[in-house]
Image (cartoon, rainbow, N blue to C red):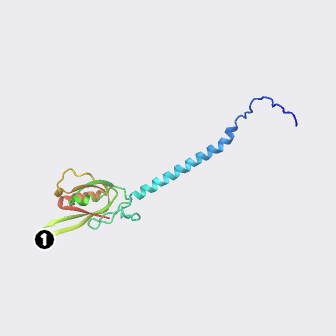
Amino acid sequence: MPATSEVPRFDPVRVRGGMCLSGRPGRQRRRLLAAVLALIAIAFAVAGARDADGARGHPGARPPAHTAPVSGSRAAPAHPAAGRVTAPVRIADAATVRLLRPGDRVDVIAAAETAGGGDARVVARGVRVTKVPEPLEDTPDAGALVVLSVPRDTAARLAGASAAGRLAVTLW
């Protein structure tokens, strides 16, 4: 059996810059992965914003961008959001307003009371509910307030119709 020999003592071997060369591809991959994830998040945010404008219960349905024409006018806005305003509207039936949530699409119907009965007409079609404020009073005859996003001309028609009669909504 051979005699054991001792290994001489020496300092450890250190390679300069070794981590930089092997770390660079890993850093590049991490940066690429972060950029791809950021792009995916942006795509989902844009797609979610488009889908949030849809009606509740009808995920694929897009309501018309225009409202009921006024005495023969056929012009519709070039862009659905062009010229939109928020219009607070008092709906006669407070219980119906409790069914609404922001984002819902509704038709607004004006009912004018006449001596011979009632006359109803659609004042706005497919308008979006922006907000449903909490009622301030508990009188059921007072109705309830709802805030709608409508074109400017429709807001004027809604104001005129609410002054002339009672308003109701139908949920899309």
- Which residue lies under the disc numbered 1? 116
Label 1 Cα crowd, 10 Å radius (few <14 / some 14-19 / many 20+): few
Residue at the limit of the structure toward the front, as seen here = 1
In the rendered structure, the answer to whether residue 152 lies left or right of residue 30 reads: left
Quadrant into which the C terminus falls: bottom left
Residue found at x 74% / y 31%: 12
Q: Position of residue 1 (x, y in %)?
A: 88, 37
Does residue 153 lie above or below 71 as drawn? above
- Pick the residue in front: 98 or 107: 98
Above or below — where is 116 with respect to 94? below
Q: Quadrant of residue 55?
A: bottom left
Name of the residue lying farthest toward the bottom: 116
Q: Residue 16 occupies which quadrant of the picture? A: top right
- Indicate left or right for 73 with 5 as reference: left
Residue in front for this viewpoint, 23 or 161: 23
Q: Residue at x 23, y 62 (%)?
A: 168
- Residue 63 location (% of width, % of height): 36, 64
| Amino acid, disc 1 | Gly
Q: Tell me the residue at 11%/68% (across/down).
A: 115
Residue furthest to the right? 1
Q: Position of residue 100 (x, y in %)?
A: 29, 58
Residue 25 spot, x, y in % from top left: 65, 45
